[in-house]
């Protein structure tokens, strides 16, 4: 796998594209899912807690209103401090009729004798409520219980008062009907969730399941009883996730009623409370899977588009190195790669043309050298024969003249052959020079491509610097958002305090409560938007870092591309060296042709001289003999030169045969 990855540019491109796209996507989606689910869970618990606090505050306000009204009655009637039941009971009758929430008002003396409005007297000195109020001199509120007189549910509120000397004088006792309280708790809804009221000891006071009322919560919660009691009964407020005995899981928030120690509990099914969180998590996972599939497909297509032409160029250059010059690259478009393919095709065309010309010229040179060899052999034989026949020239000058004429014609044919060889060598030399020029031009194009890719690398590095600057500015934006979030949290706390104060103020604080609620909503919106901006800025920062990494990797890929093009330049240099070698050999052929031509001219001069001698007198036979000897020596040189030319032509043909152009 590693070996294949190291040699495959397609695998590298796919890995790079997947890394650039999927790593930031996975990081962003993971952060988004973690932040959004955490924020939604926190928001849900905050809302649930706020509802519990508001409900507990409403109950506390209702109870304190009743206690305050009782205290005002005591302060307004000095008869209570005097402790005369005959004067106090008529006042209690009027109070009972005036307040529909109160079933009855009773006057309890310092000894525990409770005087009722119907005239009866009951001893309550042993009741916990009386003892608590007597010992602490503070208002005592009982849990909801059955009235001994009527059998109805009541809440007993004992308001103590003192004598002028500060001693305990007695109690003003109210028997409140919990109907309003039950209605208040029953109206609390959170989706399919609801609220219920616990006593300070954990007994159900109000619950929509009536059979639970009066029973300890621990007996009905099963395994969750210990966790429930440790959280709800020991803390003033908070949240708790627990499972009841029937297997139903709930998310709960609770808050204490300040005046009584009761606990207002708001519960809702966990699957309903965290439904949005689960939907967000599933959606994020689906996005990641779909994105992975799409990006993988795109990466495969892009890698194929980029690597296919490079692989084709590599395959073609391998064939060229093996001598096969038949195939050509298909050019589509005008980008850098397509331009390189066009230049390579042009180079191969020029190279094929050169090979063709060299092949044709070598054939011509080989044929001409063979003809020259045959002619030189014939001339040498004729010269030798003439040398043997010198003794007969004196008696037969006519025959010698005819032989000399034949020799002159042979030399004329040899001169024509040598001229053809010289012309062919000159043509091959010119074609070789053209190929050298074309190969040099192709080498210059490759060098220009290297310089262009280097310039592109510099531009990419400037882009990397700009991305780093953007990352620093994103950090600054994150610091500003932290300040905004802090302000929103402080505003939210102030709004919550204002809501509590408005609840305590009763009717006079309703307007202020509305304003506080709006401020709280505004603060919550500000915090939410700040968190959203934080997520976006974090995503931008991560993407900026990823882009910087991708740009650096792009620079490395650009450097690899420069290396590949440099290798093509080295191939050009190898081809240029080979062509120059062929050119040097052609120059040698041309030089040999010139030497042969010079020898032929010498032979022609000798033949002219021989013709002149044959026309002269016999006394010049000695000179003719010397001329014949010189002619034979020249023909030997011509034969040797033609043999060398033939061998050079064979070598040239063998070199050219290594290249296949058809």
Image (spheres, grey):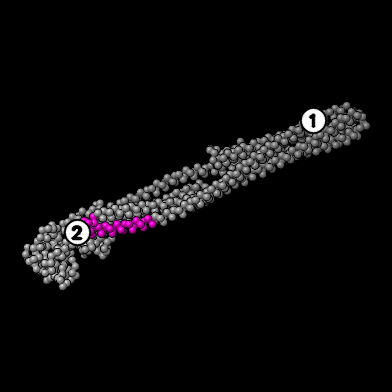
Of mark 2 and mark 1, the one earlier in the sequence is 2
Range covered by the magenta-colored residues: 483-510
Q: Which of 623 and 569 is in front in this view?
A: 569
**2 vs 1, front mark:** 2
What mark, if any, has residue 5 been given in the picture?
A: none
Q: Which of 451 and 85 is in front in this view?
A: 85
Q: Is mark 1 on a helix, strand or loop?
A: helix
Q: Name the residue under label 1.
A: 412
Q: Outermost residue, left direction?
A: 119
Residue at the image point whose x is 66% and y is 37% from the top: 354
Q: Mark 2 points at which residue?
A: 62
| Residue 372 percent location from the top left of the image | 76, 34
| Residue 130 percent location from the top left of the image | 15, 68
| Residue 198 percent location from the top left of the image | 21, 61
Q: Which of 274 and 14 is in front in this view?
A: 274
Residue at the image point whose x is 56% and y is 39% from the top: 329
Quadrant of the drawing holding the C terminus: top right
Residue at the image point whose x is 28% and y is 52% from the top: 272
Q: Can residue 92 be seen in this view?
A: yes
């Amino acid at each position: 796998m590693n070996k294949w990855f190291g040699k495959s540019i397609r695998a590298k491109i796919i890995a790079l594209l997947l890394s650039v796209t999927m790593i930031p996507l996975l990081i962003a989606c993971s952060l988004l899912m973690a932040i959004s689910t955490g924020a939604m869970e926190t928001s849900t618990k905050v809302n649930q807690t706020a509802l519990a606090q508001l409900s507990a505050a409403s109950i506390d306000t209702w109870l304190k209103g009743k206690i305050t009204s009782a205290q005002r009655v005591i302060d307004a009637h000095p008869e209570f401090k005097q402790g005369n039941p005959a004067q106090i009971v008529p006042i209690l009758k009027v109070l009972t009729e005036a307040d529909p929430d109160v079933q009855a008002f009773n006057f309890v003396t310092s000894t525990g004798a409770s005087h009722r409005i119907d005239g009866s007297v009951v001893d309550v000195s042993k009741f916990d409520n009386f003892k608590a109020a007597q010992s602490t001199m503070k208002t005592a509120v009982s849990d909801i219980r059955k009235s001994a007189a009527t059998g109805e549910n009541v809440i007993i509120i004992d308001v103590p008062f003192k004598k002028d000397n500060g001693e305990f004088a007695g109690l003003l006792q109210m028997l409140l009907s919990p109907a309003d309280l039950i209605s208040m708790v029953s109206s609390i809804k959170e989706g399919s969730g609801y609220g219920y009221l616990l006593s300070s000891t954990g007994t159900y006071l109000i619950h929509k399941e009536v059979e639970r009322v009066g029973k300890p919560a621990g007996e009905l919660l099963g395994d969750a009883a210990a966790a429930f009691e440790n959280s709800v009964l020991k803390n003033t407020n908070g949240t708790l996730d627990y499972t009841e005995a029937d297997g139903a899981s709930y998310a709960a928030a609770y808050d204490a009623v300040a005046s009584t120690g009761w606990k207002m509990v708001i519960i809702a099914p966990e699957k309903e409370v965290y439904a949005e969180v689960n939907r967000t998590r599933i959606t994020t996972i689906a996005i990641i899977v779909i994105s992975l599939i799409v990006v993988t497909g795109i990466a495969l297509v892009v890698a194929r588009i980029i690597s296919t032409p490079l692989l084709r160029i590599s395959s073609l250059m391998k064939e060229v190195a093996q001598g096969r010059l038949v195939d050509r690259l298909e050019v589509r478009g005008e980008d850098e790669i397509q331009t390189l393919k066009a230049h390579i095709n042009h180079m191969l065309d020029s190279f094929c043309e050169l090979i063709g010309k060299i092949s044709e010229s070598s054939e011509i040179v080989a044929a001409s050298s063979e003809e020259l060899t045959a002619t030189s052999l014939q001339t040498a034989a004729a010269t030798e024969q003439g040398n043997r026949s010198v003794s007969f020239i004196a008696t037969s000058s006519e025959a010698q003249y005819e032989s000399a004429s034949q020799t002159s014609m042979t030399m004329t044919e040899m001169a024509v052959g040598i001229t053809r060889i010289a012309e062919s060598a000159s043509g091959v030399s010119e074609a070789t020079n053209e190929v050298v020029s074309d190969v040099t031009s192709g080498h210059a194009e490759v060098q220009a491509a290297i310089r262009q890719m280097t310039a592109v690398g510099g531009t990419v590095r400037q882009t990397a610097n700009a991305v780093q600057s953007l990352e620093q500015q994103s950090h600054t934006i994150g610091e500003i958002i932290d300040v905004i979030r802090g302000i929103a949290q402080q505003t939210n706390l102030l709004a919550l305090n204002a809501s509590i104060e408005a609840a305590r103020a009763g009717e006079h604080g309703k307007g202020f409560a509305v304003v506080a609620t709006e401020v709280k909503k505004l603060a919550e919106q500000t915090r939410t938007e700040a968190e959203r901006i934080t997520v976006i800025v974090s995503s931008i920062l991560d993407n900026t870092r990823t882009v910087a990494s991708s740009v650096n990797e792009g620079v490395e890929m650009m450097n690899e591309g420069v290396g590949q093009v440099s290798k093509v330049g080295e191939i050009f240099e190898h081809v240029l060296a080979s062509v120059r070698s062929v050119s040097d050999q052609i120059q040698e052929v041309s030089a040999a042709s010139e030497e042969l031509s010079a020898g032929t001219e010498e032979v022609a001069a000798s033949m002219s001289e021989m013709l002149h001698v044959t026309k002269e007198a016999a006394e010049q036979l000695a000179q003719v003999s010397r001329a014949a000897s010189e002619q034979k020596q020249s023909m030997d040189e011509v034969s040797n030169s033609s043999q060398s030319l033939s061998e050079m032509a064979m070598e040239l043909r063998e070199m050219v045969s290594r290249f296949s152009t058809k």
